[in-house]
Amino acid sequence: MMLARKGKAYSLLAALLTPAAPVLPLLFESKLLFMPSREMEGCPADHGLKFEELVVTTPDGCRIHGWLMMPEVMTPDGKPKAWVLYSHGTSGNISSRPEIAARLIQRGIATLVYDYRGYGNSEGTPTEKGTYTDGETMLHELLSRAQDPRRVFLFGRSLGGGVSHELAFRHPELGGLITDAAFTSVQAITRILLPIPFMWRFVRSRYDNLSKARALKIPRLVMHGTDDTVVPFSMGEELRDCTEPKSRFHAIEEAGHMNTYVIGGDEYADVVSKFIDSCIERSRDSGRDSGPDSGPDSRIDHSMDAT
């Protein structure tokens, strides 16, 4: 009897929500997937960091804003030991990210943070395809400065993990991919944050990180907070386990979704720095091999990801 009542209740709920089904995912995407802020709360100088302000124009005519922060300690050839393109999460803008970059810069890593279209001082309105274009444009800028793609690394946090996975798929020549609090796909996270039957089918954005991770051939470091209540820790484990061999993995104990780098502290930055060092050392000693870390799998169809 109880199951019958529950069945009737779910049927009634589905009947009530079905007319709104195409609308709710749109609200989800506009209000939860992208939460930009135009207000700039500060700049790297407030954290004692030297920086260069960058404004680059994407192929579709959007002016994208970023900050390139260089380390004071360079290698003997006068260059940073590595270059990182940092793609941030869902909310705010880059004005709240210099704190994350500071620890990387202290370890000799040049870091470029940028805002997607619609965020901060970047023009336009955010979309999945737009974030890919913005990231690609900033990556091109960074590559032109680094000159050696093996020393360029992608670092994506939360939503930025989606952008970084796409760029890693396009650019197997890069040094490696680092993610923090990344989800497996928008459809999967929608099922958790919007737990209405079949609602995930109406979501247009994909950010299908799990499929792309399986196809990647560059080294990966996956980091995730054990107490993340937005993107479950299990999603980090899925991303870790989806390739053979598994990616490197760093569990940040007692960290939630928003404070991984705060809780992680110096250890967080050390893990990133040591991963970068190992990738550079590997590429120096043996170059790209033909094993699991060498290039993308062209059999994967990502044509629907840039919607």
Image (cartoon, grey):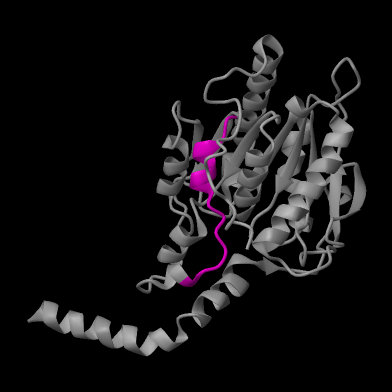
Asked whether the viewer can see residue 43, the reply is: no
Image x and y of residue 179, in percent: 59, 42
Q: Residue at the far top: name it.
A: 285
**Horizontal side of residue 74 vs 8, given as left or right:** right
Asked whether the viewer can see residue 47, the reply is: yes
Q: Quadrant of residue 147?
A: top right
Compared with 295, 102 (above or below) is below
Q: Quadrant of residue 192?
A: bottom left
The quarter of the picture where the C terminus appears is bottom right
**Horizontal side of residue 91 vs 67, given as left or right:** left
Of residue 183 and residue 102, the one placed in the foreground of this image is: 183
**Horizontal side of residue 146 vs 220, given as left or right:** right
**Horizontal side of residue 126 vs 229, given as left or right:** right
Q: Residue at the far left: name it.
A: 1
The quarter of the picture where the N terminus appears is bottom left
Q: Which residues are magenta?
A: 202-217
Residue at 55% over, 35% down: 297
Compared with 305, 289 (above or below) is above
137 is within the stretch colored magenta: no
Residue at 57% over, 46% down: 260
Compared with 245, 286 (above or below) is above
Image x and y of residue 263, in percent: 57, 44
Image x and y of residue 245, in percent: 45, 26
